[in-house]
Amino acid sequence: MTTILLITLLLIGFSAGLLSGLAGVGGGIILVPALVFFLGYTQQQAQGTSLGVLSFPVAMLAFLNYYAAGKANGQPIDLKVIGLLAIAFFAGGYFGSVWALRINQEMLKKLFAFILLFSAFKLLEWDKWLLRWIKSFN
């Protein structure tokens, strides 16, 4: 492994971890695009690598900080909700990976980009702006 590759991997990993802890994002938003653009991974390689990185031990430290803060301020994280989501996430992750491995690389990239774009559109509340703009013509 070259020094440049080592530094690149550490910067990508740190950025993804920082954003994961800060905003609950990182794998899909940072790791996958960075692995594709900077390291030339296929979309499937990048997604699989991201899922491997985000496995239980890595996310646990960030979760424990949020859990402790929630308990301290009277807004605890419900472990039953986490358990149910985790079971469904486990099954969904399996079936999603099966489908992703069957989809053409270009189509998978477009699907991934659409999901990111849709998420940004909703988070920025551009959908509300667009609806107001459309209604202004009536």
Image: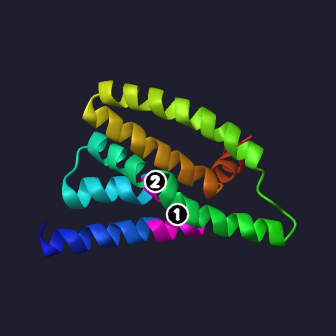
Query: Of helix, strand and loop, which mostly describes the magenta segment?
Result: helix
Residue at the image position 12 percent from the left and 70 percent from the top: 2
Camera-side residue: 127 or 138? 127
Residue 56 image point, x, y percent: 51, 52
Image quadrant holding the N terminus, namely bottom left
Picture coordinates of residue 78, whole percent (x, y): 78, 51
Evaluate whether residue 25 shows in this view. Answer: no
Give amino acid for label 2: Leu
* Residue that numbered label 2 is attached to: 54
Determine the secondary structure under disc 1: helix
Is the residue marked by circle 1 packed among few (<14), some (14-19), or many (20+) residues within 10 Å? some
Instruction: Tell me whether the residue at label 1 lies in contact with that at label 2, contact meaning CB atoms closer than 8 angstroms.
Output: yes
> Going by the picture, which residue comes out furthest to the left?
2
**Residue placed most toward the observer, 57 or 106:** 57
* Mark drawn on residue 47: none
Q: Nearer the viewer, mark 1 or mark 2?
A: 2
Queried whether the magenta region covers residue 92, the answer comes back as no
Q: Is residue 38 visible?
A: yes
Please name the residue shown 38% across and 26% down the image: 98
Residue at the spot 62% in from the left edge and 34% down from the top edge: 87
Relative to 31, residue 81 above or below: above
| Residue in the picture at 39% in, 25% down | 99
As shown in the figure, which amino acid type bears the numbered disc 1? Ser
Q: Of the numbered discs in the image, which one, if any, rests on residue 20?
A: 1
Q: Is residue 57 above or below residue 115?
A: below
Bounds of the magenta segment = 17-27
Q: Position of residue 92 (x, y in %)?
A: 53, 31
Q: Any magenta on residue 19?
A: yes
Give the quarter of the image for residue 73: bottom right
